[in-house]
Image (tube, rainbow, N blue to C red):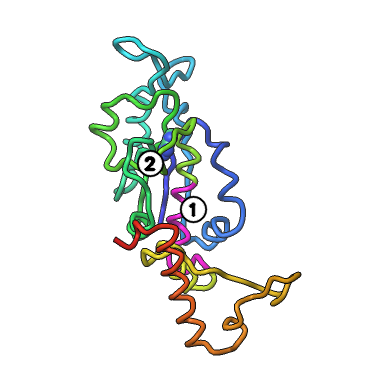
């Protein structure tokens, strides 16, 4: 999978890809992430990328021209399965969507800033709009990083233990069961006995029961 990220602040985005699972995914070639500094696509002398909104009002609007130039340059090189604008009024990202995006080959992510982008970008250049939740960030970069993390870890072979993505919370509409590690007793707090019994079928049953119990208690909406 290849992800091209269009941003005004590439430096804000780099570190998540320099550690742990994302770093390994890039090193193994299973995922490629490329950053494109939108300012370099501006034709203005001062590398301007935003302007005042028509009709007045507070805040600046990201102009269509540099965005169009950047997306067009990328589209000349390859076909894209999704051109995504990160925005709080997009469709909320969830595990089902992450699974879907993890099967695609080429994705563009466009990070907004200021008041957002000229509506014509959304009407004519973008294929999907994604939000990471009902709150407003200063820009789309952190949302893009979060999108990449949730999607790249699902690419086959990226996680060391192939089964571990399957037991994640939400993967089957259930929250994950509680997990424990050594020591079996810390202060007065003991690990459930079943987990140290060595009885794998019983452990599996216990995990299923706990996942259901936790989901019923914390996120009953997932069970509907
Ligand atoms: N940009 C600003 N806020 C955002 C959010 N909640 N989701 C995605 N992109 C955003």
Residue 178, by quadrant, is: bottom right
Determine whether, in the image, residue 219 is placed left or right of residue 189.
Answer: left
Mark number for residue 195?
Answer: none
Q: Position of residue 116 (x, y in %)?
A: 38, 27
Residue stretch rendered in magenta on the structure = 146-159
**Residue drawn at the location 41% of the way across and 62% of the way down:** 170
Q: Earlier in the sequence, mark 2 or mark 1?
A: 2
Extreme-bottom residue of the structure = 199
Residue 24, by quadrant, is: bottom right
Mark 2 within 8 Å of ligand 1, using the beta carbon: yes
**Residue drawn at the location 41% of the way across and 18% of the way down:** 60
Q: Secondary structure at mark 1?
A: helix
Q: Position of residue 168 (x, y in %)?
A: 46, 65
Quadrant into which the N terminus falls: bottom left
Q: Dot 1 corresponds to which residue?
A: 149
**CA distance for labels 2 and 1:** 15 Å
Q: Is residue 18 magenta?
A: no
Of 5 and 98, nearer the camera is 98
In the rendered image, the vertical position of residue 56 relative to residue 73, given as above or below = above
In the rendered image, the vertical position of residue 114 relative to residue 175, given as above or below = above
Q: Secondary structure at mark 2?
A: strand
**Residue drawn at the location 28% of the way across and 32% of the way down:** 122
Q: Dot 2 corresponds to which residue?
A: 131
Q: Is residue 6 visible?
A: no
Quadrant into which the C terminus falls: bottom left
């Amino acid at each position: 999978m290849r992800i091209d990220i269009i941003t005004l602040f590439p430096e804000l985005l780099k570190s998540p890809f320099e550690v742990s699972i994302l770093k390994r995914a890039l090193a193994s070639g299973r995922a490629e992430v490329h950053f494109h500094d939108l300012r370099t696509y501006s034709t203005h002398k001062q590398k301007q990328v935003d302007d005042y909104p028509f009709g007045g009002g507070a805040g600046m609007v990201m102009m269509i021209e540099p965005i169009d130039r950047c997306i067009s340059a990328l589209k000349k090189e390859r076909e894209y399965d999704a051109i995504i604008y990160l925005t709080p009024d997009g469709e909320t990202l969830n595990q089902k969507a992450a699974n879907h995006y993890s099967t695609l080959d080429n994705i563009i992510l466009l990070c907004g800033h200021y008041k957002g982008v000229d509506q014509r970008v959304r009407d004519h250049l973008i294929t999907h709009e994604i939000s990471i939740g009902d709150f407003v960030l200063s820009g789309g970069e952190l949302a893009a990083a979060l999108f990449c993390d949730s999607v790249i870890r699902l690419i086959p072979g990226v996680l060391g233990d192939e089964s571990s993505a399957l037991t994640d919370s939400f993967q089957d509409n259930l929250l994950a069961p509680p997990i424990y590690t050594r020591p079996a007793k810390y202060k007065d707090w003991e690990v459930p006995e079943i987990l140290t019994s060595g009885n794998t079928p019983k452990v599996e049953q216990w995990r299923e029961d706990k996942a259901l119990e936790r989901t019923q208690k914390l996120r009953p909406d997932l069970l509907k």
